[in-house]
Amino acid sequence: MYETYYGLSAKPFQLRPDPHFFFGSKGHKRAMAYLEYGLSQGEGFIVITGEVGAGKTTLVRNLLNKIPTDQIVAAHIVNTSLDPEDTLRMVVSSFGLPYEGASKAELLNRLEQFLRGVDRQGKRALLVIDEAQNLNARTVEELRMLSNFQTDDRSLLQTFLLGQPEFRATLHSPGMQQLRQRVIASYHLGPMDAQETRAYVEHRLATVGWKGDPAFDEGAHAAIYAYSGGIPRKTNTLMDRVLLMGYLEEMHAFTEADITEVVRDISEEYQLPDAVGTPDAGALPQDGLRSMDQRTGDRRAASVEVLDERMMRLEKSIVSVLSILKKIVATPQGAAAQHMDNQE
């Protein structure tokens, strides 16, 4: 693997969110400040939105790693393509409560008793909802109703909502007025600029012991930013492939041309073949289009978690083939065969 070749202690550009690699860009620092402010308030909703791969999940996991567990009991939900009652079951389950076979009334009662027990222990309960753009209006309203659990002087449950930009449309729809009144802070996490993207790359490399090998010139960093647009996940995808190519081709320095070559390879891999039998989008009703978009988004979100594993299997396969070829070339039989081919 390229980690050993470059003297790194681990893969620096894995796709799964890891707070160990948290990088505080201007946007991420501001978003973290909003989360910490909301946490200090102990009530209401905090809303953080951002593009796919902007680092929202890493942000919240970094926060969860920092909060004192003797003061806050937190539950984190990432599967949000659910109806209101299933979402309630997910909330109950995330706090470690039994939910199977229970009616909605029983679920609400169990949750309320649990929250009151947490309060009696001098702690607070925090619910973090990721991928909030998948929530429909009825489910959002169900979550709002949970904020009604309170004592005479304080709320028993605080909620953070993290989602893609389209969640803001849900938030500002006519029926969401009561929820908007309970949002105490909202922030949109944008992409990093070119300078921050370079610092992000170097930060992740340094986190796993990078000592300047491999090196990246100015053109290489410019090409990295041009491809990724300052989105952390796109940067990770590209850089993982760059380092793999560097290992296979025994490279210790990268230029703009090298990055461009990897970008071209990635683009070719993800080109779609000519559609056969695909229905015309114009012929579909709008509800059908929204349903297709949601299913596509769900599949894309689910694939992120397994993409790292697939890439690792691909790397192992490539490295195995490369090792076999090197052994064949290095053996006397291989040298003799090559000599006979030259005589012919």
Image (cartoon, rainbow, N blue to C red):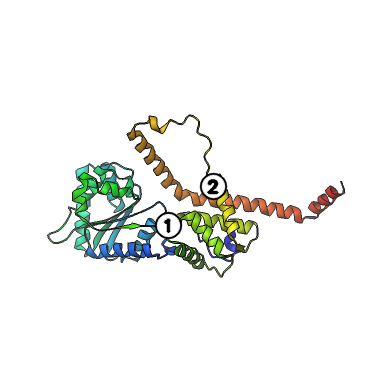
Tell me the distance, in whole angstroms, between the alpha carbons under discs 2 and 1.
24 Å
Vertical placement of 289 versus 97: above or below?
Answer: above
Residue type at numbered disc 1: Pro
Is 240 in front, or is 156?
240
Residue 279: mark: none
Residue 17: mark: 1
Quadrant in which the N terminus appears: bottom right
Counting from the top left corner in percent of width and height, residue 211 is at 56, 70
Disc with the residue nearer the chain's start (2 vs 1): 1
Is 257 in front, or is 336?
257
At 28% from the left edge and 45% from the top edge, which residue is drawn?
87
Task: Determine crowd level at label 1: few under 14, some 14-19, many 20+ residues with C-alpha closer than 10 A.
Answer: many
At 52% from the left edge and 35% from the top edge, which residue is drawn?
274
Mark in the foreground, 2 or 1: 2
Counting from the top left corner in percent of width and height, residue 296 is at 41, 41
Picture quadrant where residue 2 is located: bottom right
Residue type at numbered disc 2: Ser
Q: Which residue does the numbered mark 2 point to in the structure image? A: 267
